[in-house]
Image: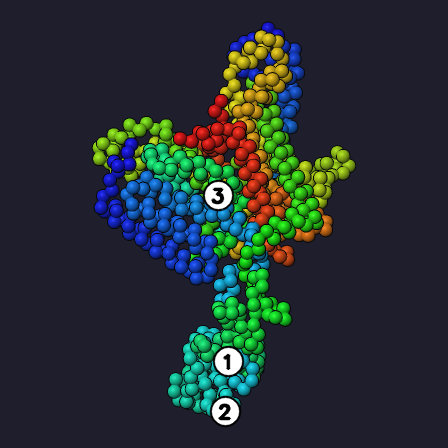
Amino acid sequence: MKTANIKLSLFNYALNLGVMGVILIAILRVILLLYADGLYPLASVLSAIAVFLAIIYLRRRFTPVRWFGIGIALALLFTLYPILYTFYLSTTNMKSGHLMTKQQAINQLEDQTYLVEGDQSYGWTAFVNPGGEYALWLMPDEGAGLLAFPGEPLEEVPPGEKGVGELDEDRIPISLEGYERLPQNKTVAIIAQLGEINFGEDPNIVRIRSLREAAPLKQKYQYDSDLDAVVDLETGEIYRPIDGTFTSTEGAELAPGYIVFAGVKNFDSFLGNPGFREPLFQILLWNISFAFWSVALSFALGLVVTLLFEGLPGSRIIRALLIIPWPIPVLISILIWRSMLDPDVGFVAPVLESIFGSSPAWFQDKNWTRIGVIMVNVWLSYPYFYVISAGAIRSIPHEIYDAAVVDGAGPWNKFYHISLPLLLRILMPLLIASFTFNFNNFNVIYIFNFGKPAMPNTVVPMGHTDILISFVYRLAFITTNVTNYGLAAAITVMLFLLIAIMVVFQARFTNLFREVD
Amino acid sequence: MANTLKINQPSWFSYTRRTKWASFTIRYLIALVLILFAVVPALWVVSASFNPAKSLIGGTLFPKNPDLSNYDELLYNDFFPYLTWLGNSIKIASITTVCTVIITCLAGYSLSRFRFKWRQQFMIAILILNIFPPILGMVAIYTTIQQLGLYVSQIGLDSHGGLILIYVAGSMGINVLMVKAYIDTIPTELDESALVDGATPGQTFRHIIFPIMRPIVITIGVLTFIAAYGDFVIARVLLKSSEKLTVMVGIQLFQTDRFDQDFGMITAGAVLAAIPIILIYIPLQRYVIDGLTAGSVKG
């Protein structure tokens, strides 16, 4: 079929134009905001997506691509971009304290204010309306009082206007229309709440400083783009950028810091430091053996089930019972196992104790936790291997066995010399794919025991059953003291490389890419 | 071993009459052990959920006075909104499924029926991208969603919109190729006759092709639903507030927090959370297995 056959009516074209226009304007708005805040990576990928969508929906030549334009846009943003962004992050210092761009950090610093000390202060009296909104009557040392509402300019209001009642002997209005005057003893209880409110309008903001005093609020920091430095407007101190932190000559640092290029620092921190490298290598070794044994044992069990129950009377019922683990959501299954093995609520410990006199510490002992986690994973995945190996075995022609039997082969020989090699050949791509999957099987590791038991004396918290991806999660999302996205990304980059190697390996065993046409 | 020469012998093992019974006994014994291994955890959690005692189930597989008190507590407790979680999960998984099915079907149709530049490279790119598990991008996905959320809070952190977009993006890859492979098996004469009659490609797809894609649509729909419903880590990373959580994240947090106090409730929660998937799985089992084993056995 030729693309030229496809004719879009004018109406369709106009519809495309309209819908695309709306989407593009929405994207464009976000791009501009991102750009203003210095979030360049995300701004550029969104720009690329916007250009791509505009081209394919407005040029007739690209009609076939229109069918999956939105799909490509999503894949670019949430599949391809995260991979590239991970590589980018691995070369930055992004961690707690350095989570935003320079521009965002400057914006936040410039929002900070301070209360001006000295003569510019007021005495104050608070009024509240039934809606819980406050107003202030501000008394300077000399001159007339000011009426202040949040978000409205300060104003000198003589008694009788705007609902302001008669003044008492302290020149404070007795009443304010719609509001109730708060006596001093009541304001004590709400002073913290009152202190949060900005009275007046930018830039003339007044805040309550103490029970007696209110004072104007001033901007504390200002970024000077010529100096590339932040100036403290209160003290005149200058803070220059050093490694993503504005720092004064005396070494005082301003928070928040921002993201800067850190080169190979992240990689160096775990490759160059033996105290980090060695436990990480332990994690890698365990990661490999966890994936290997999970696949090997699940495959073996699936195969045993296939072979043993083929042709056995009642095998249908047996099989139906054996795939029971399959439909249960993985997370639920792992939680069930965790509870079963728990010494307090589970039944496994009492049973084992009555047989062997003791029961393993499934969650404290490193070896037993590892055995437990592999056992649970085998339970989760053998039904899959059972189903695929049953299918594969049916695809082996019977003639081969018949010929072997003629040559005097027994059941073991038939299995070892015919079934197993053929099955391995057929299923090798799936076994490798399954290895890759289990190499990153976060759920089993994390939900079973959070990667614990903990390794003693490591630079950052690590566990004996942590695999690389659960360690990455620990670094990035378990906020014990410091979350470190840059470091987490650097380790993820290593994971990407490992998986790329596996993929090359897999491509050798399969016509993965040749099959596409 | 002359009797093993029968061509239609279905078994892997060949027997003399004498060893046959011994072999059967051993195989049934092994079957029994394996069945226990498969069934006991599921059985145990169901029974524990009906056990009114709060903890210390001990060795009893069948509680003495089964009742629904755990379920009662689960649905009407003050600590966490279980039903909201369950509703969130079903909502998120359903929307993800509908979007994925629409996007993959359109993409698959185009890849199967149109010939255009970069088509082949495009499919290879899908395969390659699909190899890297989405979980590897979690740090990047988290920060991306956080940054988008600064300007569009509907797809930011702690929003269901962002989560759905990520699920849809993650589930497209291999599904597109499955749909494409399925449409390849539909004769092109069907499309061509429709086009000759003056239908646009859009109409042809809607009225001719889509209706006969039912099996693949069900397969993809079911697999996507199960994956989105069962996801833990992405939802765990992106969602924060209690009333936004999915049931998987909620139940895991709850288990970590209040394991000893409310063990019975947790088991009840686990059973209820598994039910939607089992309800989908049982009638549609064939499609699930087809989908999961697609391409695995080509001989």
Q: Kindly identify which chain the residue marked by label 2 belongs to.
A: A
Q: Which amino acid does label 3 sit on?
A: Ala
- Look at mark 2 in the image and give the residue it sits on: A142
**Badge nearest the viewer, 3 or 2:** 2
Same subunit, labels 2 and 1: the answer reads yes
Q: Which amino acid does label 1 sit on?
A: Pro
Query: In this view of the protein, which residue sits in the foreground, A290 or A31?
Result: A31
Binning the other alpha carbons within 10 Å of mark 2 as few (below 14), some (14 to 19) or many (20 upward) gives: few
Q: Kindly identify which chain the residue marked by label 3 belongs to.
A: B
Is residue A44 something one can see in this rendering? yes
Q: Which residue is drawn at 38% across and 36% down?
A: B119
Q: Kindly identify which chain the residue marked by label 1 belongs to.
A: A
| Label 2 to label 1: alpha-carbon separation | 16 Å
- B32 is higher (above) or lower (below) than A38: above
Query: In this view of the protein, which residue sits in the foreground, B24 or B147?
Result: B147
Res A154 → quadrant: bottom left
- Look at mark 3 in the image and give the residue it sits on: B228
Residue B55, percent from left and from top: 66, 46
For residue A67, side relative to residue A467 (left or right): left
Q: Which amino acid does label 2 sit on?
A: Glu
Residue B125, percent from left and from top: 44, 38
| Label 3 to label 2: alpha-carbon separation | 68 Å
Q: Which of marks 2 and 1 is nearer the N terminus?
A: 2
Q: Which residue is drawn at 51% across and 62% down?
A: A102
Query: In this view of the protein, which residue sits in the foreground, B49 or B118?
Result: B118
